[in-house]
Image (cartoon, helix red, strand yellow):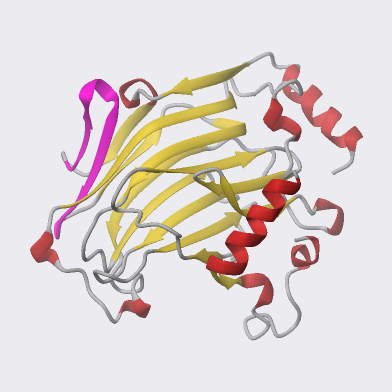
Amino acid sequence: MATSNVKSLLLSFLLFGSFLMVAYGNFNEHFDITWGDGRAQMLNNGELLTLSLDKASGSGFESKNNYLFGNIDMQLKLLPGNSAGTVTAYYLKSPGTTWDEIDFEFLGNLSGDPYILHTNVFSQGKGNREQQFYLWFDPTADFHTYSILRNPQRIIFSVDGTPIREFKNSESIGVPFPKNQAMRIHSSLWNADDWATRGGIIKTDWTQAPLTTSYRNFKADACVLSNGASSCSSNCNWFSQQLDSTSQDRLKWAQNNYMIYNYCTDSNRFPQGLPPECNNA
């Protein structure tokens, strides 16, 4: 993205004079439970949040604030044992019919088989940019940090500080990039046994219900939408952050060893040619 465009974008935010935020930890202060009829709970004075799923319903929550650029961290401990048929979704999303969205989705599996970490990027309502990974640890044994960094040039998905995916701004070749809409943080735990595990062959085992995912140590170092606009300071490290050589090596390591699907290499899916942003990967 050209420097002049970044400066113009920055100026348009500053004119409205809203604010930057570094938010830590407390779920009571920064989130609302949105559905689940008591299956979602904030515990330990807001330091811990749990989502539960049973045969009747799942549950979910969302942030009180709308975030534009910045870095969002959340620690998750996924539901253990037989998680087949379940999806834990943790994502950023704007409202409307031409929404922007940045997704982490954890697709459950049979006991002993790994979770699949599914990522996607939507811009102006268009997605179909999936990359999927196995993880190099057991995500049910302890909490791990899942991060989304968004600035005008790129989106970086990271796990415990290791980048696994970078989606670059390719507006110069006609690909919309999610840079104008602020997004809320959402998360939900729900039943998707019609597709989530082996194409729907494996169904959810309700004898283990309620099934529970836990959250802690939320952190948002980001600009927040206020009074209809947002301001971002170019002094913030994340505003122009990119991957250094060490991070690029870690990205290659993760993708070479743990990526199991990449839409940018799926020529059968795109017989007329791969999406143009794949040339900017």
Residue 63 magenta-highlighted? no
Q: Magenta stretch containing residue 46, yes or no? A: yes
Residue at point 52%, 66% (across, down): 132
| Between 113 and 206, the one nearer to me in the picture | 113
Residue 221 drawn above or below residue 140? above
Left or right: 202, with 172 as reference point: left
Name the foreground residue: 17 vs 269: 269
Q: Look at 33% across and 48% down and name the residue there.
A: 188
Q: Position of residue 101 (x, y in %)?
A: 55, 49
* Residue 235, percent from left and from top: 75, 20
Q: Position of residue 88 (x, y in %)?
A: 35, 54
State whether residue 71 appears in this view: yes
In this view, 40 is above or below 276: above
Q: Is residue 106 above or below residue 193?
A: above
Which quadrant would the C terminus be assigned to in this image? bottom right
Displayed quadrant of residue 61: top left
Q: Nearer the viewer, residue 183 or 249?
A: 249
On screen, residue 173 versus residue 105, left or right, reads right
